[in-house]
Amino acid sequence: MNVQVMIEAIPALLGGAVLTLQLVAVASFIGFLLALGVTAMRLSGRIWLVAPSYAYVFFLRGTPLLVQIYLVYYGLSQFPEIRNSVLWPFLREPWWCALVAFSLNTSAYVSEVMRGAITAVPVGQIEAAKAVGMSSLKRFTKVIAPQAMQIGLPAYSNEIILMVKASSLASTVTLLDLTGVARSLASETYLPVEVLGMAGIIYLILNFTLTRILRGLEWFVSPRQKSGPGTLAKA
């Protein structure tokens, strides 16, 4: 194994890692906002809102992310309406196409996390909040949202980590993210094991760091974890 090649590849791979983190961060933010709307539609109880939101989630969760990336990157260009619109300067670029595909994909998964977390809040607590005269907004902000956050955050954390790993698919549309740079270097050096191995190490470091941050966030929003087993025993 050529350790020298692995060391020399680090700067270029770190440059690709920055692009990977940018893509994941922006896609996660946009996907979270989209998921809020989709979740509200799913829980509205109105069939004309529930049906399209269910179809949206069903399609995006039921088809591979790679197919969705190809549909956005290769598929949209065949429509003259898209090529002649103000969106075309963005949608002809691989970064924006990958961003659209990742945002839509993660929004479907996050909306299910949100829906499950909200419906898992005990009904008795919601009824008690109604009994004391809380408005719908206050019930949501004071009773439902804090508990739903505690319930859904572990699953949402897993989705973020999965997004980091799935971001490697962006290289299939010529985007030079971490995997894209690694593939390019491997083809130049003819040493795929060394270059891709170093890329794998960087992915491990990224995911380990994100896992620690997200675990810390879970601890911060969870009173039970803060109290610890000793405190619970005393109670």
Image (cartoon, rainbow, N blue to C red):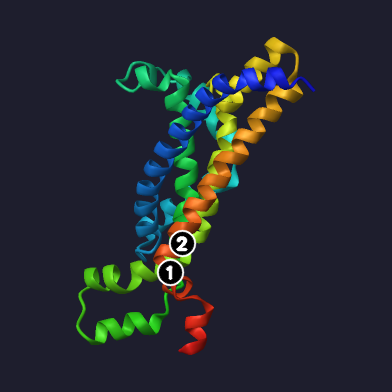
Q: Residue at x 19, y 83 (%)?
A: 133
Q: Residue at x 50, y 23 (%)?
A: 15
Q: Is residue 33 visible?
A: yes
Tell me which amino acid carries mark 2. Glu
In the visual, does 36 lie left or right of 219?
left
**Which quadrant would the C terminus be assigned to in this image?**
bottom left
**Which quadrant would the N terminus be assigned to in this image?**
top right
Say which quarter of the image contains residue 205.
top right
- CA gap, disc 1 and disc 2: 6 Å
In this rendered view, identify the residue nearer to me: 46 or 153.
153
**What is the secondary structure assignment of the residue under circle 1?**
loop
- In percent of width and height, residue 173 lies at 55, 22
- In percent of width and height, residue 114 lies at 43, 60
Q: Which mark is residue 218?
A: 2
In the visual, does 60 lie left or right of 82?
right
Say which quarter of the image contains residue 181.
top right
Q: Residue at x 35, y 17 (%)?
A: 89
The residue wearing badge 1 is 222
Q: Which mark is residue 198?
A: none
Residue contact at pointers 1 and 2, CB within 8 angstroms: yes
